[in-house]
Amino acid sequence: MSTSTRYKLLSLLKNSKGEWLSGEALSSELNVSRAAIWKNITSLKEEGYVIESVTRKGYCLMDAPDLLLKNEIQEKLTAKIFGAGEIVHFHETDSTNSRARELAERGSPEGTVVVAEKQTVGRGRKGRSWFSDDKGGIYMSIILRPLLSPGDTAGITLMTAVALAEALLSIAPIDVKIKWPNDILVNGKKLSGILTEMDAGMDSVNYIIVGVGINVNADIDNFPDEVREVATSISAETGMKLSRNDVICAFLERLEFYYESSRKEGFASVIEKWKSLSDIIGRPVRVDVVNGSFTGRVADIDPSGILVLEDKDGNTKRIISGDVTIMK
Ligand code: BTN
């Protein structure tokens, strides 16, 4: 049975809303044998769908799993590229960015998504780790193949941050802020992080992996101490439990919107959105870079995503990458 027939089977079960559907009716509706129906019911059960089967009554869907499954996401997704094709799901993997990289190396197209319920070696920026247990987080990576030269890609991370912040604002009553370049904060604590990794030649980008971690329904009491001090989750902030698949859909749709618009018009308007969602323009900061740190006031984020820092004598410094700490 093809994947699409399998999704049709699932959607028939879902639409029957607790009614029993006979094997005979399903097999004639989907034009496959009853044995094929039974086989696919078994594999849906293995995925976590609770389907009861009773002789002479047929099948009834009792419960769908709270998992980041392709069909659960695509059922609601309106994006045409991001997540519209392959969504590769792992119950557990080391890092979705690593899995996405492998797929990209093997030629997977733009928009391919990798999701995991849990990561054993979740990676953050600058060699840090990203706490990734299976208690309500989203760990996902998307393959992008932009027609940009490698030096013009900083806007991709900023665009992702804007899409993520707006998706979260649209779905939960939280006051989300972006901290340059890629942190999504609520009340000064980290809700979500972005890790973009690129493979490029001298003149062109082969692929970019946009990796996103979001603490959705996580109970922060389960976070390790050092994480709990600096991180939060949507449920911790609002008391709400959200559908993680709804969060994924909202994010992929915004990301695709900004990706398409920046393809036509460049990143300038995304940067303006970024500035309005950020709370660092004009503020005194310290920026830690690879070989030291700079202090000053954030004068601007320029159209290519570079942070412009102004020191007390009015000299400006342009910083491509670093960690910002807001000074009191
Ligand atoms: C950061 O803020 O340092 C970035 C965190 C990025 C975490 C995500 S989770 C999905 C993807 N896979 C990884 O290993 N990392 C990113």
Image (cartoon, rainbow, N blue to C red):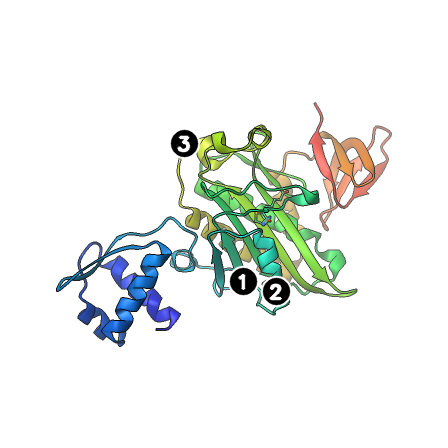
Measured along the vertical axis of the image, is residue 231 above or below residue 91?
above
CB at mark 2 closer than 8 A to ligand 1?
no
Instruction: Count neighbours of disc 3 (C-alpha within 10 A) and say few if under 14, some if 14 to 19, many if 20 or more.
Output: few
Instruction: Count neighbours of disc 2 (C-alpha within 10 A) and say few if under 14, some if 14 to 19, many if 20 or more.
Output: many
Which amino acid lies under the numbered mark 1 shown in the image of this protein? Thr
Q: Earlier in the sequence, mark 3 or mark 1?
A: 1
> What residue is rendered at 78% in x and 39% in y?
289
Q: Position of residue 306 (x, y in %)?
A: 75, 46
Q: Position of residue 272 (x, y in %)?
A: 64, 45
Q: Are the residues tagged 1 and 2 within 8 Å (C-beta)?
A: yes
Q: From the viewer's perspective, tell me whether residue 66 is left or right of residue 213.
A: left
Q: From the viewer's perspective, tell me whether residue 314 is left or right of residue 67.
A: right
User: Tag 1's secondary structure?
Assistant: loop
Residue denoted by label 3? 239
Q: Earlier in the sequence, mark 1 or mark 2?
A: 2
Q: Position of residue 216 (x, y in %)?
A: 47, 40
Residue denoted by label 1? 112
Which amino acid lies under the numbered mark 3 shown in the image of this protein? Gly
- Residue sitting at the far top: 328
User: Depth check: 206 or 119 in front?
Assistant: 119
The answer to whether residue 51 shows anywhere in this view is yes
User: Tag 3's secondary structure?
Assistant: loop
Measured along the vertical axis of the image, is residue 26 above or below residue 134?
below
Residue denoted by label 2? 104
CB at mark 1 closer than 8 A to ligand 1?
no
Say which quarter of the image contains residue 193: top right
Instruction: Count neighbours of disc 1 (C-alpha within 10 A) and say few if under 14, some if 14 to 19, many if 20 or more.
Output: many
> What residue is rendered at 21% in x and 75% in y?
28
- Dot in front, 1 or 2: 2
User: Tag 2's secondary structure?
Assistant: helix
